Amino acid sequence: MLLVGVLPAIVYGVLALMIPESPQYLIRKGRDDDAARILSRVTGVAETAGTLDEIRASLRIEDKTSYRDLRGPMLGLQPILWVGMAIAAF
């Protein structure tokens, strides 16, 4: 019974290696050429300069997250975290 899950896991593992990295991640790392190549491959549009500029603008105005964002009124955590922990427990 344990071996039934092996084949889907192998297929998923092989296919996961083919997933391209996010253009937003690549722009954050300074790999703009790779981001433009992946974006044009995924969208099918050859000209991606406008989209790359939009991604850069969104990265500039994006707030940095911290563990302080998880704090809330219910026993020190946000309610959605309690829901997630309950689902994980069940």
Image (cartoon, rainbow, N blue to C red):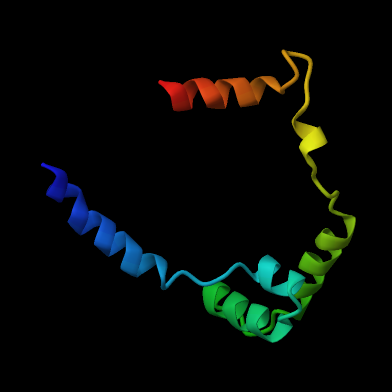
Res 70 → quadrant: top right
Q: Quadrant of the N terminus?
A: top left
Q: Where residue 8 sits in the image (x, y, percent)?
A: 23, 55
Residue at 26 percent across and 62 percent down: it is 10
Residue at 63 percent across and 26 percent down: it is 81
Q: How many marks?
A: 0
Q: Where residue 44 sits in the image (x, y, percent)?
A: 55, 78
Q: Is residue 27 above or below residue 33?
A: above
Identify which residue, 56 or 74, lies in the foreground: 74
Q: Is residue 14 above or below residue 66?
A: below
Residue at 61 percent across and 67 percent down: it is 22
Q: Is residue 59 above or below residue 50?
A: above
For this orientation, the residue located farthest to the right is 61
Q: Is residue 74 above or below residue 9?
A: above
Q: Is residue 86 left or right of residue 60?
A: left
Identify which residue, 31 or 3, lies in the foreground: 3
For this orientation, the residue located farthest to the top is 74
Q: Where residue 48 sits in the image (x, y, percent)?
A: 70, 79
